[in-house]
Image (cartoon, rainbow, N blue to C red):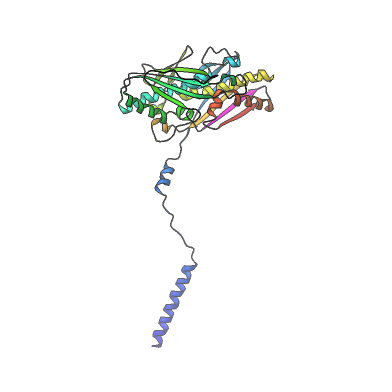
């Protein structure tokens, strides 16, 4: 009996020792599995692409050369800045970007949905106050835009489906619609009521006989624009984003040029490089917004010092209708690089 009691006492002591050791060990909790929504968000992290364009003043006042993906084209300044306005101007480029983007989205979406589309022409109008461009203390931003789609083939219901694709897949639309109202219409074009004091700029984009290629007409100028790879386009000529970024770059170039003359600031050369970040998956139809999320403008200047360059940047921010429009849709960073 004594041995039995002794053995039980030893067993109880051993169990107590094991329990004490276990209590002293750090507790390790299992890592909780990510919630389905969180896992989905992680798998859909933004994959942004960057597009860019460069504008350089030519040897003729009020005229710049734009380079975008190896394409080069001439852009003219506008009358409020003393420009010749013979070639396409920055507003032509901005509205042309919206018009061609719509043209190509309609073309691709019609193919995807099996909707007949025999002809398509997009007319885009933008209302703005030109006095601000000339230096008056008013905002020259685009206050309203209208897109009229003249089509042959789709029914009214099918046309609305194409318009929905335009609203969700065009990075120019999804950007500019954050800055100003954009009205889309079909059928017979109606005259718009424009607010007193505003001017209206317009362009027309027509599909050519080559898929993914359009002809743009702006104030008697005609030029070719190509669709982009997410839409199956050739992307050989300038594309809609090239136009939009070229608009901001040339507008900055011409405002700097004119403001330097007005302020008697020496300006021997100016080159504007504009970059934008966007999600190209949305262009192809993924359920993400393809809008421009950020813009960067680098102004390479020869002549002004930093203080003078800041004055020119301020004029750019106040007098450029492209800047004052886009800054309502996405942050724009301006960097002056002086020599």
Using residue 259 as the reference point, say whether residue 233 is left or right of it: left
- Magenta range is 294-305
The residue nearer to you, when weighing 21 against 318, is 318
Residue 214 placement (x, y as % from top left)? 41, 18
The reply to whether residue 70 is visible in this rendering is: no
| Residue at (48, 65) in percent of width and height | 25
Residue 272 placement (x, y as % from top left)? 58, 24
Is 304 a magenta residue?
yes
Q: Is residue 282 above or below residue 59?
A: below
Residue closest to the far bottom: 1
The reply to whether residue 123 is visible in this rendering is: yes
Using residue 247 as the reference point, say whether residue 36 is left or right of it: left
The residue nearer to you, when weighing 245 against 29, is 245
Residue 79 placement (x, y as % from top left)? 58, 14
- Which secondary structure type mostly characterizes the magenta part of the structure? strand
The residue nearer to you, when weighing 40 against 126, is 126
| Residue at (46, 68) in percent of width and height | 22
Q: Which quadrant, please, contains the C terminus?
A: top right
């Amino acid at each position: 009996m004594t041995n039995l009691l002794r053995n039980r006492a030893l067993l109880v002591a051993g169990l107590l020792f094991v329990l004490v050791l276990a209590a002293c060990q750090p507790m390790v909790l299992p890592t909780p599995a990510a919630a389905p929504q969180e896992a989905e968000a992680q798998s859909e992290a933004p994959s942004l692409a960057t597009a860019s364009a460069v504008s350089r003043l030519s040897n003729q006042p009020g005229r710049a050369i734009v380079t975008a993906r190896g394409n080069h084209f001439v852009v003219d300044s506008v009358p409020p800045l003393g420009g010749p306005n013979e070639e396409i101007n920055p507003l032509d480029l901005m509205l042309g970007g919206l018009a061609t983007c719509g043209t190509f989205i309609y073309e691709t979406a019609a193919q995807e949905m099996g909707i007949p589309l025999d002809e398509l022409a997009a007319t885009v109008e933008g209302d703005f106050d030109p006095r601000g461009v000339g230096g008056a203390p008013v905002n020259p931003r685009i206050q309203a835009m209208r897109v009229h789609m003249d089509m042959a083939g789709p029914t009214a219901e099918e046309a609305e489906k194409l318009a929905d694709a335009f609203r969700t897949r065009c990075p120019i639309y999804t950007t500019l619609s954050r800055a100003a109202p954009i009205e889309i219409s079909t059928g017979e074009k109606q005259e718009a009521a424009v607010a007193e004091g505003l001017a209206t700029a317009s362009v027309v984009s027509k599909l050519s006989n080559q898929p993914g290629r359009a002809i743009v007409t702006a104030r008697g100028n005609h030029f070719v624009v190509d669709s982009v790879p997410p839409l199956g386009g050739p992307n050989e000529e300038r594309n809609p984003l090239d136009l939009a970024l070229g608009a901001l770059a040339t507008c900055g170039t011409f405002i700097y040029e004119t403001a330097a003359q007005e302020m008697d600031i020496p300006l021997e050369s100016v080159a504007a490089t504009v970059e934008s970040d966007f999600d190209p998956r949305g262009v192809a139809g993924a359920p993400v917004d393809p809008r421009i999320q950020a813009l960067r403008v680098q102004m390479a200047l020869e002549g002004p010092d930093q203080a003078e360059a800041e004055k020119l940047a301020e004029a750019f921010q106040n007098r450029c209708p492209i800047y004052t429009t886009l800054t309502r849709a996405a942050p724009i960073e301006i960097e002056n690089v002086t020599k």
